[in-house]
């Protein structure tokens, strides 16, 4: 266990008894109200009717006959009791305040497994189920849940996961907000949960009219964006936010949130490529061009090939470290699934191999730890089953299995302002 014991035990108690719904608002309220635990009953508090102090009355001295106390002694005891009780009430009021989300070196691991959603310690220990879905395939899959990273908002205060969706059933996005004890569910299909840079909104495809819905973490829709002809429709491309949060990009178009007309991206724009990612400060973009990894300024004026060849064009992600000094990416040839995780240094061009798959397995990089010293990734077999979540140090050492049976998960970033 770690420094989050109270939070973890409380979640475990709640999940064991109440968390059978993907939107367990009432149970979540009880969990958070109980997160701050009361200390054990003080030894000086005896049971009702107990005689705490007793003495044989002395002749000629007025006393409280039922208890055998002098008036002066009783007054002193009464004042002491009032002081202690008042202090206990004040301390208790502070203790029952909800504990903020973890703010340590690594937060919780959220992941989907067999139709359910779990929260665990960063290393997969002490897992508790927060949404109970239906396992298996077929029509039952419409009542299942999963979470492809990133599930956590950038500030680490909210996390979101999806229900399965297809032509038979519409999808939903479930947003959990422990800070305000809220759980919201909104209509939305797609794969990734696209969080805004300020962590206050998500963007998701909204069926059936192929529009993009912008929702607050309270579930209230703030905008509905219509995609023009020539831009991608729901499928392999989810919306990606601009650093200023004023637009979303759906390859190969940019759609402003203020209602302005969407427009196609020119080929000189780094975001015109299918695989790309902003740096943490928003000044640079990394993208995959053919089998090469390219770093460019956000306006496309400073293109530089960082890795020549060997980058998996069919990979799912290229990710920056929190400080922007390293880039992790899926590696492999275009004729096969990505079978390596590699790390590139934009300043020196140095490339380090972090993990390698065996046989027909594939690898997918997910996220850096908040300190940038570890990387979360998934192993997938040729059929997308028999998956597992792993972590490895940024120098390629200390590779370890976190969760077996799933490739869907995300580490909680450091909460800001806690």
Image: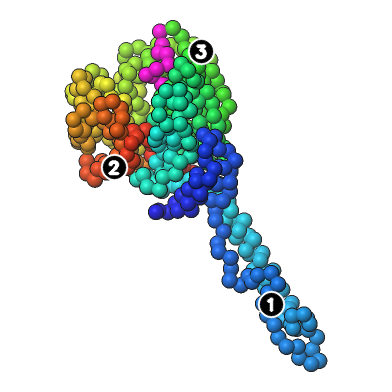
Q: Is residue 235 visible?
A: yes
Q: Residue at x 77, y 80 (%)?
A: 66
Q: Is residue 59 above or below residue 295?
A: below
Q: Position of residue 121 (x, y in %)?
A: 39, 46
Marks 1 and 3 sit apart, C-alpha to C-alpha, by: 74 Å
Which is more toward the observer, 327 or 110? 110
Local crowd size for mark 1, using a 10 Å CA cut-off: few (<14), some (14–19), many (≥20): few
Residue 201 shown in magenta: no
Q: Nearer the viewer, mark 1 or mark 3?
A: 1
In the image: residue 265, left or right of residue 257: left
Q: Residue at x 54, y 43 (%)?
A: 18
In the image: residue 396, left or right of residue 316: left
At mark 1, the secondary structure is loop
Q: Which residues are magenta?
A: 230-240
Q: Nearer the viewer, mark 2 or mark 3?
A: 2
Q: Residue at x 54, y 18 (%)?
A: 224
Q: Position of residue 233 (x, y in %)?
A: 42, 13
Q: Which mark is residue 51?
A: 1
How many numbered marks, from 0 up? 3
The residue positioned farthest toward the bottom in the image shown: 59
Q: Which mark is residue 401?
A: 2
The numbered mark, 2 or 3, whose residue comes first in the sequence reads 3
């Amino acid at each position: 266990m770690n420094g989050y014991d109270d939070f973890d035990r409380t979640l475990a108690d709640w999940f064991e008894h109440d968390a059978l719904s993907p939107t367990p608002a009432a149970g979540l309220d009880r969990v958070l109200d109980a997160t701050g635990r009361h200390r054990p009953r003080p030894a000086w508090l005896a049971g009702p009717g107990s005689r705490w102090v007793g003495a044989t009355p002395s002749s000629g001295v007025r006393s409280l006959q039922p208890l055998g106390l002098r008036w002066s002694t009783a007054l002193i005891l009464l004042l002491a009791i009032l002081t202690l009780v008042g202090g206990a009430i004040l301390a208790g009021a502070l203790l029952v305040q909800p504990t903020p989300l973890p703010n340590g070196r690594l937060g919780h691991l959220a992941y989907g497994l067999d139709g359910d959603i779990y929260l665990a310690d960063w290393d997969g220990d002490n897992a508790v189920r927060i949404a109970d879905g239906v396992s298996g395939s077929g029509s039952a899959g419409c009542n299942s849940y999963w979470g492809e990273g990133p599930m956590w908002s950038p500030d680490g205060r909210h996390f979101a996961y999806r229900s399965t969706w297809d032509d038979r059933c519409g999808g939903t996005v479930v947003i959990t907000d422990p800070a305000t004890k809220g759980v919201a569910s909104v209509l939305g299909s797609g794969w990734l949960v696209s969080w805004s840079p300020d962590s206050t909104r998500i963007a998701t495809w909204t069926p059936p009219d192929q529009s993009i819905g912008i929702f607050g973490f309270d579930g209230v829709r703030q905008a509905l964006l219509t995609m023009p002809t020539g831009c991608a429709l729901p499928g392999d491309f989810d919306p990606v936010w601009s650093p200023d949060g004023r637009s979303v990009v759906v390859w190969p178009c940019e759609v402003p949130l203020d209602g302005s007309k969407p427009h196609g991206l020119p080929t000189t724009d780094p975001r015109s490529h299918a695989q790309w990612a902003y740096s943490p400060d928003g000044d640079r973009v990394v993208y995959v061009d053919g089998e090469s990894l390219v770093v460019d300024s956000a306006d496309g004026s400073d293109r530089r090939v960082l890795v020549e060849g060997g980058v998996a064009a069919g990979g799912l992600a290229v990710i920056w470290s929190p400080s922007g000094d390293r880039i992790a990416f899926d590696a492999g040839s275009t004729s096969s699934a990505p079978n390596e995780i590699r790390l590139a240094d934009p300043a020196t061009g140095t490339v380090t191999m972090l993990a390698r798959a065996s046989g027909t397995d594939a690898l997918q990089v997910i996220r850096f730890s908040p300190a940038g010293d570890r990387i979360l990734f998934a192993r997938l077999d040729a059929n997308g089953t028999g998956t597992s979540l792993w972590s490895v140090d940024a120098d390629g050492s200390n590779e370890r299995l976190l969760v077996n049976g799933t490739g869907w998960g995300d580490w909680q970033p450091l909460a800001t302002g806690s």
